[in-house]
Amino acid sequence: MTPDNKKMWEELGIDMKPHDVLMGALGPIYKEIYLSQQNRPAGMGFFDFVVGDIHGIRVQELREHAKKGGKVVATYCVFVPEEMVWAAGAIPVGLCAGTQFSIPIAESVLPRNTCALIKSSFGFKLGRICPYVQVSHLIVGETTCDGKKKMYEILGQYQPVYVMDVPNKKTRQGRELWLSEVMAFKEVIEKLTGNNITAENINQSIDMVNSRRKALQRLNNLRKANPVPVSGKDALLVTQVSFYDDAKRCIQMVNTLCDELEKRVAAGQGVAPTNAPRILISGSSMAIPNWKLHHIIETSGAVVVCEESCTGTRFFTDMVKPSGSTIEAEIRAIADRYINIHCACFTPNDERMDDVVRLAKEYKADGVIHYNLQFCHTYANEAVKIEKRLEKEGIPLLRIETDYSDEDAGKLKTRIEAFLEMIRK
């Protein structure tokens, strides 16, 4: 903790006692899970540095932006079109939390049978522990699940919140509803920032966000190699960091890492033996510092090669397609890109079934682990269809339901080891 950081946190209203406990616990956990890995790419050093100063430099950058009159817009979901935020001169930052630490705080207000991601995220605001929440001027939510919808109502008592309505169906009517939501969001962001979104500045933001998506695609395509040049834990961390780091810096550092990984692939150098079981994880998102499942899998002799999730392929798969020079055309292109995210909130959602099968084949996965956060009913119910589809395709599946605590780590390891033994035969 530097004196400058401490002063900044205090000025942001951070409750220093629990914050210091959290920061003190994060270092040893990170060392055990990440720094203990063998044969890590040197390019991961940047991401180690980001996590090592997770509440420092980036928060300072956001605060300096705010001091100059800029706005910080916080989000909890990949459905919020960040291109609109960048185009208005604001900075978007992801808020989803993946730690058990803040959950008891949240449970003083929220029901206990709420998913861990919602409770953890809300607990950071209620306990005044997260500087990214404190530095933000607006939190943008979305209607992807009932738990989040109702949490946003309560969160709005503590900080300004705006909620975007995501339709339940991808019909013509649903797409038009979503387009109207994106148009309304434009007005909200313009009012917040005092800046007009033009065709020129939105084209620039589209190019920048597309470039980050391409960098993350490049990274994940390299995971198709055998041996795999980077661990699943490290690939997950890169995506997690990209939700809040500066976009241009992220593009540069991900591409630098990929340059190194391409050399590794050419040399046949990997982080796991060529016969290590290759695992695709599908399901709920994994926010920092939720690394439990990846760590168990990869310390059990397998390697995670892909994540079909919002902290995986759903975040970066599709680009916003250039649609001309008018602001209306560009906004429609943005709306079209985001409505094609295959979240479990949609019904029907056969596209996600297709994605899981396609990705399993593309990444030559030996098995799929469907990860479901406890009390996340959308993914729990959709897992039934996933199981039937993968059975039909002859792809082994293990369904995991868990939360952020380590209480079930031993049980999970036993189940995962048995699954890996099965697919090795």
Image: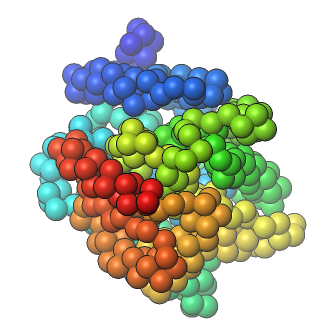
User: In which quadrant of the rendered image does the N terminus lie?
Assistant: top left
Q: Report whether residue 3 is seen.
A: yes
Above or below, comparing residue 255 to residue 56 in the picture: below
Residue 89 x, y percent position in the rendering: 67, 45
Residue drawn 47% across the image and 83% down it: 392
Q: What is the basis of the colouring in this image?
A: rainbow
Above or below, comparing residue 58 to residue 93 in the picture: above
Residue drawn 38% across the image and 60% down it: 422
Q: Nearer the viewer, residue 382 or 193?
A: 382
Residue drawn 24% across the image and 37% down it: 101
Residue 340 x, y percent position in the rendering: 61, 74
Identify the image quadrant of residue 64: top right
Identify the image quadrant of residue 91: top right
Above or below, comparing residue 230 to residue 387 in the picture: above
Residue drawn 16% across the image and 62% down it: 113
Q: Nearer the viewer, residue 227 or 262?
A: 227
Q: Report whether residue 158 is seen.
A: no
User: In which quadrant of the rendered image does the C terminus lie?
Assistant: bottom left
Taking the view exactly as shown, the residue that stands out farthest to the right is 325
- Number of labels in the image equals 0
Taking the view exactly as shown, the residue that stands out farthest to the bottom is 172
Q: Nearer the viewer, residue 331 or 1?
A: 1
Taking the view exactly as shown, the residue that stands out farthest to the front is 425
Residue 329 x, y percent position in the rendering: 78, 73
Residue 236 x, y percent position in the rendering: 51, 44
For residue 376, side relative to residue 228 (left or right): left
